[in-house]
Amino acid sequence: MIKQIDEEEVLHISPYVLQIEKFANSLKQLSNTFLQLEGEKNTLTNREIEDMFLTVRDAVCVHCEKYSWCWEDNRIHTYQMGYEVLAAIENYGNELNVEIKRKLQARCVQAPRYLREMLKVFQDAKHNMLWEKRIASGREGCAIQLETFADMIREESRELEDSIVSDVRMEKKLETELLKIGIRVLYTTILLNAEGKYELYLTACAKKGASISYKEFAEQVSAITGKRMVAQDIAHGTLGSDFSTTIFIEGPAYYTLYGIARIGKDCEQISGDNFMVIDLPGGKQCIAVSDGMGSGERASQESGLVVDLLEELLKAGYPEKTAIQMINTSLVMGREEIHFSTVDLCSFYLYSGKCKIFKAGASSTFIKRGRMVEHLNSTSLPVGVVQKLEVDSIERQLDHGDFVIMVTDGIMDALPVAEQDIILETIIKGTDKNNAKEMAHHILEQVLEWNGRAPLDDMTVLVASLWRFV
């Protein structure tokens, strides 16, 4: 059902949001159109079977001396025989059962040729049906993508509209005070992000002869607003003489440090596991691990593709669960063989200290709080297996000095089947490492020592620690 905008909503929405709503409604309608088209077909229709019989008749029977007897005098019995042959082909393949062969030879003087032609048209029909199923599956995938995109742009446009703050006094104050230190401000946009924190978009340049570092710029903006503001994605350098837009965000309360330790199957250099660590707007940071099917270069390519797509979608503003589902749809569509990859994603909300973990076929995740260890698992499937993927999500409140530990299947499979979680919990609980990198290497070394032989699968440990700014 397409959501309509009522008259009361129109009074409070800008023309830009209304236009985006129209785009979203059009995408929804297109999605519904795709879904209403013919779906997947698992059986041949009566018309298709009729066409098969006619094709066999034209190829084998037209010039046969028994044509009139079979297709005119005993038409019903001929069709019944054809149905029995098709049923036998469906059940036994090319090798029909003896009874059907004997029955066909008794009724048809060209039984071998009739059977060869029937096998050919049947295989052609099944092949066509397979392609039709793929087309239907592709349409369904496109419909899911369109509907997801429509929901996202509608939600994002509303959030953006609601987040814009009109504060003429602050804008004037920024313009006046920054001009005193040699910064000319052209435009100012003030937003409140989802965490209720300020984001400033300042289009500015340095006055002729002025040399203003971004660090000094941020300090001045902090002094003027009375909040600790940091320049996003800019750590060094100076403000140029040409106008450019600098984004300042209210400094988060927490920061993260991470460490990675991994080894390939049989100690090979190429690992089928890949990982990412990215910073996102709104005081959010994401880490993820993906384990490709199998090991070696092919698995590395598969998991690398998943990680690259995930990074692109998250940076573009897609919600985590939506991003994973869209990657899944992309991998399922148009593939003859199944090549799956797991996804283990953790988003840290650095203003509040919360984290949200998303899992698609991934191994266990562990949260270490001092000597306490919490074990989180999932029953969801990896990406690339089924069209409609359910992604598990778990939210936890973290505190200063807590650790999140992600591992791939190679780590778990190296331990005894019935004791994997208990042993790994014991290893994590027993370490006194406060450095994320050292902890990751310690866990990997302990598992390898416990196993006592070369890795039978790619093994990766990704550790992130959360710390409060002093």
Image: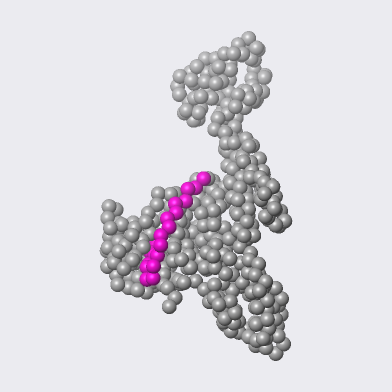
Picture quarter with the C terminus: bottom left
In the rendered image, is residue 113 in sight?
no
Residue placed furthest toward the top: 73
Tell me, yes or no, whether the highlighted magenta stretch contains residue 406.
yes
The part of the chain drawn in magenta is: 388-407
Q: Is residue 419 visible?
A: yes
Q: Is residue 158 or residue 427 the one in the foreground? A: 158
Q: Is residue 76 above or below residue 240?
A: above
Question: Relative to residue 328, is residue 407 depicted above or below?
Answer: below
Of 332 and 36, the residue lying toward us: 36
Residue sitting at 27 percent across and 63 percent down?
426
Q: Would residue 468 be found to the left or right of residue 161 on screen?
A: left
Query: In what quadrant of the picture does the N terminus appear?
Result: top right
Residue 164 coordinates in the image, percent (x, y): 63, 64
Position of residue 240 relative to residue 384, above or below, is below
Quarter of the image where one finds residue 458 = bottom left
Task: Give percent across and percent down for residue 437.
Answer: 39, 72
Residue at image point 45% right, 24% down: 97
- Which residue sits at x=50%, y=28%? 90
How many numbered tags mark residues here? 0
Asked whether residue 269 is drawn in magenta, I would say no
Name which quarter of the figure residue 223 lies in.
bottom right
Q: How is the image coloured?
A: one colour
Whether residue 187 is situated above or below residue 315 in the rendered picture: below
Q: Quadrant of residue 224?
A: bottom right
